[in-house]
Image (cartoon, grey):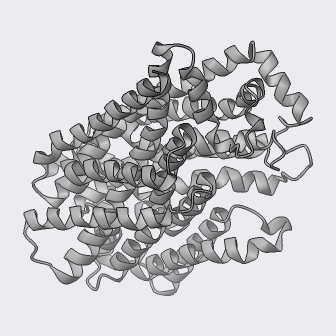
Amino acid sequence: MTLALEVGTIAVYMVAMIAIGVSVSKKNKSTEEYYLGGRQLGPFVTAMSAEASDMSSWLLMGLPGVALFGLIGGGGTFAEAFWTAAGLAVGTYVNWLVVAKPLRIYSEHIDANTIPDFFSNRFQEKNGVLLAISAIIIVIFFIPYVASGFASVGKLFNTLFSVNYHTVMIIGALVIATYTILGGFLASSFTDFVQSIIMTIALIVVLWFCLSTANGWDNAIGAAANQVPGYFKLNAPDGSYSPLTIVSNFAWGLGYCGMPHILLRFMAIEDDKKIKVSRRIASTWVVISMGCAVLIGVLGFSVAKHFNMFANAHFDAERIIIYIADQIAQINPIFAVIGGLILSGILAATMSTASGQMLAASSSVSENLIHHFFMKDLPAKKGIVIARITVLCITILAVIFAWNPNSSVFRIVSFAWGGFGASFGPLMLCCLFWRKTNVQGAIAGVLSGGAMIFIWKFGIAKLGGIFAIYELLPAFVVSLIVIIVVTLATGGAKEEIAAVFDEVKQIKKSGINVAELD
């Protein structure tokens, strides 16, 4: 009975997501609508879809897993979870405050529907070199990112129902691909909105159960503190968290200004005057949700101990919410439905991010590579067909990358996050705020940032000591320096490009909605 109710709740949820894709599929009459929803998103949907697509399974699996890992002898600490979450919270707010409005205005003014479009059109590029490089980088880093989401689906069902990891991972991938292929950006955004609500409910219920099982806050925190003395010190009990390490984890927040699936939400809001409302909603939700996720990792130790979960030789800290949901479902039939809803929350976190990433990667291939370089006179209907085929191809590649069931969600996401943050983050800031930026500096910055992610992670970081930091921080700094140096060395921006920059700056100052100028 319990199992049937859990599975039934999850099934209803997945069917509902596909239904949303079907319902909005007829609204996609052009690739602009398919990839950007015609720039018609309201402030609430914009905020919640941006954050739902941001958080991914990392919120309900990766972050609690990192917090719990340090309590079971894994070598991690509360400091890593805390400083990472703090950096992301600050990064979210600053991204909405600094990047959202200028990008919304600039992207429409230069007729850009994707992030590679924006970079290329910003510099009035004719040969498409920056366009192609940006599109290829998106594919390189998004495929493993999407794969981490698919892996979360496989872990979820494999843990709960002992079904074959690969089978359920493929089924989950097909569900995500189906509503994304049918509904495009609108389907992704509206399902993200629904999924953010489900994720919130899941976090609240799990947190309540943890406190209830541990007999209150004091007992739960006390159990963690007794397990690892000094666990709650934000510089780590063994002194391994130096100020530099803290800064590098806090640097997760730098990645936001380079995340294509989040930046697209800024470009799609219907009115740039409503961005302030979206910023407040998004920032509040992020702080609360990540705070709950970290606490679940800490309090989950008491729950795992109470139910003797550590006796399981295959216990995985990243699956703590899955284990807790299963215990909740055992209480009675009503709680079995709630347990199914919590599991749907994990699916929601995964699906919301994967769909947004699949669209961003798809647009890079179909719009920025195929359409721009090989099929310039492509009719609108055929463009949408190619876009949908591209989503399917990316799904297949991500399934292949997700084939290993033992991969860490947190580590995969951190690498892809760093890749986008270092490749696109410095350039996005320079595009929006530095008049002199030119295409030579842009190309050099994107390449150096992306390359440094690999060089630092797989080479320099292995030296240990001060070099064993999150690769995003040094790669971001290198990319920014390269953009500035190369731009100045090559004479800065052409006058006609700088003139467009001035036009956008004036529009922003005037307070006129850019859509009113058309």
- Image x and y of residue 254, in percent: 58, 55
Instruction: Classify the position of the N terminus by image quarter.
Output: top left
Question: 424 and 271: which one is in front?
Answer: 424
Q: Is residue 124 left or right of residue 238?
A: left
- Image x and y of residue 132, in percent: 35, 78
Q: Please indicate, yes or no, whether residue 275 appears anywhere in the rendered image.
A: no
- The image quadrant of residue 195 is top left
- The image quadrant of residue 64 is top right
Q: Is residue 150 left or right of residue 65?
A: left
Question: 336 and 209: which one is in front?
Answer: 336
Q: Is residue 107 left or right of residue 312?
A: left
Above or below for 450 versus 284: below
* Residue at 55% over, 37% down: 160
Q: Please indicate, yes or no, whether residue 72 appears anywhere in the rendered image.
A: yes
Above or below for 221 versus 374: above
* Residue at 50% over, 35% down: 283
* Residue at 62% over, 55% down: 408
- The image quadrant of residue 394 is bottom left
Could you tell me how many numbered marks the image carries? 0
Question: 349 and 165: which one is in front?
Answer: 165
Above or below for 506 versus 279: below
- Image x and y of residue 497, in percent: 31, 73
Q: Is residue 372 left or right of residue 448?
A: left
- Image x and y of residue 69, in percent: 75, 44
